[in-house]
Amino acid sequence: VIEFKTSVDEKVIEGSASYDNTASYTNQGSSRDVTGKVSIQHGGESVKKGGEYHKDDPDHVYWHVMINGAQSVLDDVVITDTPSPNQVLDPESLVIYGTNVKEDGTITPDKSVILEEGKDYTLEVTTDNETGQQKIVVKMAHIEAPYYMEYRSLVTSSAAG
């Protein structure tokens, strides 16, 4: 059995990338090349956002953001979100977690690893005084792994039900 360990360190993973790997194998004086291929499940995914309502809390939208799903090496990362005008951000609810990445590429949040604001990232929430429009900006200096961010917003219209 030949097992390949392919590293794409120090790269930005674009699209649904795959990487070829060739190993030269010698056994009892006989040589041959063996090839392998690895695919990156989340290639090209810098940020992926989703959200949902909870039936027990219909006044809020719970947002989740996968940061760097491609597992690229990135510097000066800026994540900006401008919610619709009928939402009020809850900056106290924002948490960024580390992640676990399975061999098949599945990424899940690791809620035992919580990043520290001011050390691992900065957070800025601004509100336009005339329109009430808010914006959230998260900055991370250098990342090489995926992260999972959660926060919520209050829905201020009757759309909440």
Image (spheres, helix red, strand yellow):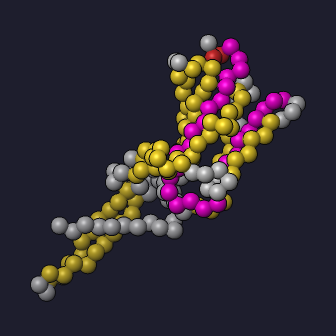
- Residue 140 vs 34, above or below: the answer is above
Residue 41 appears in the rendering: no
Q: Position of residue 107 (x, y in %)?
A: 42, 47
Judged by its main secondary structure, the magenta piece is strand
Q: Quadrant of the N terminus?
A: bottom left
Residue 159: in magenta span? no
Provide residue 11's location: percent of width, then percent of height: 51, 65
Q: Is residue 45 left or right of residue 87?
A: left
Up/down of 126 relative to 154, above or below: below
Which residue is more in the foreground, 22 or 85?
Answer: 85
Q: Residue at x 81, y 30 (%)?
A: 132
Residue appearing at x 64%, y 53% in the figure: 121
Q: Residue at x 62, y 32 (%)?
A: 152
As drawn, 43 above or below 157: below
Picture quadrant of residue 159? top right
Q: Nearer the viewer, residue 33 or 72?
A: 72
Q: Position of residue 161 (x, y in %)?
A: 62, 12
Apparent side of residue 83 relative to residue 151 in the rendered image (left or right): right
Q: Is residue 153 left or right of residue 20?
A: right
Q: Which residues are magenta?
A: 131-158
